Amino acid sequence: MSAFDSNFKFETYEEYYGDIKQVKELIDVCEICGNKLLMSHSADYTNLLVQESATCPECGNKNRKMIHVLH
Ligand SMILES: [Zn+2]
């Protein structure tokens, strides 16, 4: 785990509130200006991880990086 950039965090929905639709909106929308984020993924199949980054095309907000453990 220590091999990864500390900016990445393991995804946990526990920090979100509301139903799944509200959670998805929180994930997909810029929390600063409300525009839809551009998502990008890079999969690491060797380690069964996906790095996910979201960038806001409007204000350049780039605060969401996650690692999904593939099952
Ligand atoms: Zn924004």
Image: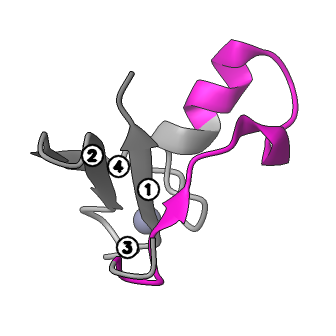
Side of 37 where 27 appears, left or right: right
Label 2 and label 1: CA atoms lie apart by 8 Å
- Closest to the camera, between mark 2 and mark 4, is 2
Determine whether the residue tagged by mark 2 lies in a helix, strand or loop.
strand
- Outermost residue toward the right? 17
- Per the rendered image, the range of residues in magenta is 4-25
Q: Could you tell me which quadrant the C terminus lies in?
A: top left
**Which residue has dot 3 on it?**
62
Q: Could you tell me which quadrant the N terminus lies in?
A: bottom left
Label 3 and label 2: CA atoms lie apart by 17 Å
Q: Position of residue 70 (x, y in %)?
A: 35, 30
Question: Which amino acid type corresponds to the residue marked 2 in the rendered image?
Answer: Val
Structural crowding at the residue carrying mark 3, measured as other residues with C-alpha within 10 Å and reported as few (<14), some (14–19) or many (≥20): some
Respond yes or no on whether mark 4 lies under 8 Å from ligand 1. Answer: yes
**Which residue has dot 2 on it?**
50
Q: Which mark is residue 66?
A: 1
Q: Which mark is residue 37?
A: 4
